[in-house]
Image: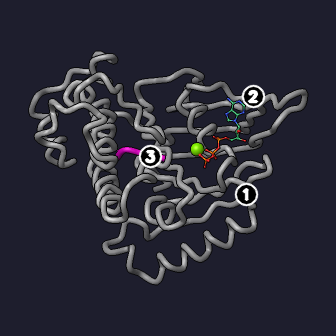
Amino acid sequence: MNSSKNLLKVENLSKVFPNGDREKVVFSGINIDLAEGESISIAGQSGCGKTTLLLIMAGLTAPTGGTLSLNGKIYSNPSSDIALVLQDYGLPPWKTVEDNIRLGALLQNIPVSDDEINDLKSHLKIEGLDHLYPHQLSGGQRQRVAIARILLLKPKLLLLDEPFAALDALTRERLQKLLLNIFRQRGLSFIIVTHDVEEASLLGERIMVMDSNGGGISAVIDNPGFLSEGYRDTPEFFERIKQLREVLKASD
Ligand SMILES: Nc1ncnc2c1ncn2[C@@H]1O[C@H](COP(=O)(O)OP(=O)(O)OP(=O)(O)O)[C@@H](O)[C@H]1O
Ligand SMILES: [Mg+2]
């Protein structure tokens, strides 16, 4: 997809946190180019800086060094073109499912029709839950409500932080398929952070590995077959998992 328009450019990004009277370099020298309609998975051990990197790309945390640009424009604040799904779903507990779904669009003044919402609910299998509160939902339902809310915002870039980590294997597989379907149909770009090698190999056209010692991206693995039918059962997929596992071990 090299002919597509470049959407996100991350240049020489670094993040340093104060750590007592010393400093902790979480990562440095990160460069990422993402075109419209492309996906990237980012894998790495716990604590290597994956969430920090997403928060920076979402414009919610300032980097220590480097620049971010979207469609060629440098940015440092949140934008309606970039949506982030966090590890803990981020659903206000005092709002019903229906209100939660509408909340993001309401805050950003994005008009949504009832048809659009109903379509999305049926697609995500969250019909009939409108009057329940987040604590009355299962983890999988909560995650799908969070995804519905984000999709109404029609972002150009979706950033996902281990979105399916808390789910059982089958629900997880269903949501991974759903994400790929939406990706195909809408031509949206996404970056998914996961420490799960199968998930990284299933969802990323490129898989980036972050190292645990402040270095940044230690390897980029191409995964061209990721959208092919039944990829999960192909020798190519198993080969990719093996390759990724080896790279991850080396990056520890
Ligand atoms: N606000 C902060 N102040 C100081 N240190 C921080 C802050 N946020 C994160 N860190 C540190 O930065 C490092 C990276 O954290 P981050 O949450 O990005 O890791 P992660 O790769 O997402 O881990 P996990 O896989 O466990 O979610 C950790 O060592 C963490 O302690
Ligand atoms: Mg994290």
How far apart are the alpha carbons under marks 2 and 3? 24 Å
Instruction: Check the image and report above or below for 18 versus 202.
Output: above
Query: Considering the numbered disc 1 on the image, is that residue within a helix, a strand or a loop?
Result: strand
Q: Which of the colour schemes (rainbow, by chain, secondary structure, one colour) is used?
A: one colour
Residue in front for this viewpoint, 234 or 72 = 234
- Which amino acid lies under the numbered mark 1 shown in the image of this protein? Ser
The residue that label 3 is drawn on is 190
The residue that label 2 is drawn on is 64
Instruction: Check the image and report above or below for 57 versus 203.
Output: above
**The magenta stretch spans which residues?**
187-191
Residue in front for this viewpoint, 29 or 85 = 85
- Which amino acid lies under the numbered mark 2 shown in the image of this protein? Thr
Residue drawn at the location 66% of the way across and 56% of the way down: 45
Q: Specify which label sits upstream in the sequence, 2 or 3.
A: 2
- Residue 163 appears left or right of 244: left
Q: Specify which label sits upstream in the sequence, 1 or 2.
A: 2
Query: Considering the numbered disc 2 on the image, is that residue within a helix, a strand or a loop?
Result: loop
Density class for disc 3 (Cα within 10 Å; few <14, some 14-19, many ≥20) is many
- Residue 230 appears left or right of 72: left
Residue in front for this viewpoint, 12 or 201 = 201
Q: Quadrant of ligand 1?
A: top right
How far apart are the alpha carbons under marks 1 and 2? 19 Å
The residue that label 1 is drawn on is 218
